[in-house]
Each structure stands twice: as C-alpha cells, then as structure tokens.
Image (spheres, grey):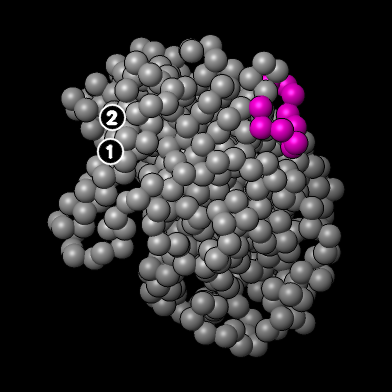
Amino acid sequence: MKIYCVANSRIPTIKAYGLQTIKMCEAFAQSDPNDTNNYTNNANKIAVELIVPRRHRYPNTGEGSILEYYNIKTPFKIIELKSPDLININLGPFFNKILFWVQQFIFARSSKKYLVDKEGIVYSRDPFVLSLIDASRFKLFWEVHNFPNKINSRFYKKLLNKINGLIVISEGLKEDFKKHYKGPILVAPDGVDLGEFNCQENKIQLREKFFNFHYDCYRRKKIAVYTGHLYPWKGADILINVAENLKNINPNYLVWIIGGTEFDINNFGQKLKIHPNIVYAIRTKTNAKNEDYSIVMEGMFSHKKIDAVLKTADCAILTGNESETISVKYTSPLKMFEYMASGCPIVAQDLPSFREVLNGNNSVFAKAGDAEDLANKIAWVFDDKNKELVEKIAEQAKEDVKNYTWQKRAETIIKFLCSQS
C-alpha cells in the first residue's frame, strides 16, 4: 500500500498541525496493512510519502532535518515541492488573501504534477489539493478538523462527490457533515506518542530549572499550567480571571502559560494591564524579577520539553470557548492527550468536544465560561486533603490515553482506508 500524505503547511513548525501531520505519517509507516494490530519500529510496511511545500523555516525550529526536529524513529520519505513563500508578505488583508490563494493554487498544481504518473491513496487535510487530484488513479481521503463555512458551495459539493471517505476528529464534526455527505465517515480523535513521556527529573529539580529566577518562592507554590496557543476560540483569556480568583483563595497559587505567538502574547499582556491585582511576568519580553507572580507567561517551548513542563506543574488546565462552535463541537486538542499521558491532573471546562474523551473518572470538570468555578476546581485539586482522589483521577487518565496513541489512530484509519479501496 502506498499513501501520499499531502500537506500545504510550513513544516517543521512549533504549531500543533505540524506535529500531528508528522506523527501520523510515522504511525502509517510503522503499520502492516495485512495486520493492523502489528506495529514495528524496524520496517516500513506501508510506503509513505509526505508532500509539502519548500518554504522558509519557521522561527525556533533549528537547522536539522524535519525528521530530526520531530525525533522520528521510523523514517519516511518527504518530498518538498517548489512553492513561493507568499504567506509572510504583509500587504494588507485584501492582498494577503490573494497571495494566500495564489500559494494554495501553485502548491496544488505542483502536487498534481508530481503525482501524475503515480497511484495509490492520497490522504490530506487540504481540500484544494484533493480537488485537483485524478480520482481515476487515486483513492482520495479528506481529514477534517473544522467545518467549512461554505459547505454548500459548488466547490465543496464537487469535492464531497469525488472523495472516497472522510476522516473527522470529533463526533460533532461527523454529525454536521452527515447533513451534506452520504459517503463513509470515520471519527478518529487526535492522539499522543506515549514514548515522549519519560522525564527522569523530579518536580524539585524541574522547578529549579524552570523557575530559577525565584526558586525559593516557586518551590512551594502550587502551579496550574496551560499549554498551547492563545487563540480566542481556545478560551485562554479566562485564565486572567482564574488567576485573580486563585490569588484570593491562596497567594501561593500560580497560573503558568506555555505557548502563544508573539502577537497573541502581546494581546494577552494588554488585557492583563487592566487587572492591577495580578502581578505577572512575560518572560519573552523581560527577565522575571524576584516577585510573587500570579501569572507567568513563557511563550513557545520546544515540544520536546512538554513532559518536563507537565511534570513540573500540579495540574493542567484545558480551556475552551463556549460561544465558538469549533471549541464546543469540533476540536480534539493535542494538549488534552498530552495532559493525560503526563499524569498531571486535568481540570477541564465542561464542553461536549472534551467529553468525547474525558469523563468524571479521568479529569475534573468546571462549568464552561465560569472563571470562579474553574479556579475553585483547581484549588480543589491543589488541596492536600484531596491528594489520594486526585492521584487516582490522574492515573485513570494515563490508563485511558493508551487508547489514543498515534499508532492506534493509524490502525483505525488504515482499516477504514482498506475498507473503501
């Protein structure tokens, strides 16, 4: 079996889509199409090619190869097609949109040309690429992470008539697509690489490493960590009010935020300025001083540090935005599975998308959109009186996440691809 994974994305990247794409290619490469329960790190039983545009590297991704950056153990072929790097040219909203579609068109045409004398399966999150690929030579499968705004357009109607199957990351997406697509749909939530969670340093050592600017103070603090982007639909803004509530409960409670682009961090910082009761540090801007902070923002960390980050904290916060459909119904955040794998207790806002994986046995839920309730649930996790139950909840999450590895996901998807081929 030959799978061509086509991704019109800048890879490597510090963003989650790059990790998800690379990990799925590796998992496909590890599998045996005749025995999808048998995975090996020593043989490529499915031929996998990842096709991406050749573009300028994303900042802070080093100089090594793509496979080295993601620490891939089972290599696969990566084809980088020539493509103009137009996305970073800022000519204003109108011209930027034109440049975006020009780049999309050129990459899609390049992909079509590269695949013209090949056959097999084309697997992609890019609908524009799939729309140009010859369906007589390939089985076409579209993986979707958000519901298209213009699903009733001629473009999407033609695409849905052309593809052989749809892979979605949530039941909410399946529910909405079934109104427009009568073909086979597979729900495959995102996943995690359990092999990445083997940090040997203890919490004391990690606190000294990450909080060396004021170690004596932060050694005794209880820390709630949030990892990932600060986009509005992810609901991270609520952490400001959560920090205020936590400070009122106990001044030794800290919200630690890992992630966010420079633009989003600046916006978050502006919002913090109107909360005079919160003492905060943005460590991408200045060196933190010996102050008793309520919020510490770090900016982006290398994904290789995620296990150490989560082991440093006392709980992990999973937020969403109850007014955004993508957050309520469609998302399957990588951080959720990483939280589970780390053994760091999870406090999550109660949203249907999270409930597809989490439950009252493996996490603690807070009312969506309620900062006070979220702070109270975090404080409950921090309370030593609840230590035994909290540890039991975290252990259950570690057990449950074994069903959500990239290998398990690839196994499920391969069975689906074979059933439609």
Horizontal side, residue 107 vs residue 273: left or right:
left
Q: Earlier in the sequence, mark 1 or mark 2?
A: 1
Q: Does 164 appear above or below 128?
A: above
**At label 2, which amino acid type do we have?**
Leu
Q: Main secondary structure of the magenta part?
A: loop
Is the Cβ of the residue at disc 1 closer than 8 Å to that at disc 2? Answer: yes
Tell me the quarter of the image containing the N terminus: top right
| Image point (82%, 70%), residue name | 204
Give the magenta-colored segment's residue range. 36-45
Horizontal side, residue 226 vs residue 362: left or right:
left
Identify the residue position indicated by label 2 in the image. 132
- Can you give x and y, in whole percent of width and height, for residue 244 in the image? 54, 68
Q: Does 99 appear above or below 279?
A: above
Q: Residue furthest left?
A: 94
**Is 327 included in the stretch rendered in magenta?**
no
The foreground one among 343 and 139 is 139
In this orientation, does residue 168 appear? no
Q: Residues within 10 Å of mark 1 (few under 14, many from 20)?
A: some
Identify the residue position indicated by label 1 in the image. 109
Instruction: Using the rendered view, name the quadrant where residue 42 is placed.
Output: top right
Q: Residue furthest bottom?
A: 289
Q: Residues within 10 Å of mark 2 (few under 14, many from 20)?
A: some
- Can you give x and y, in whole percent of width and height, for residue 206 in the image? 77, 69
Q: Residue furthest front?
A: 117
| Image point (40%, 20%), residue name | 138
Horizontal side, residue 210 vs residue 284: left or right:
right
How much space separates mark 1 and mark 2, taking CA atoms? 7 Å
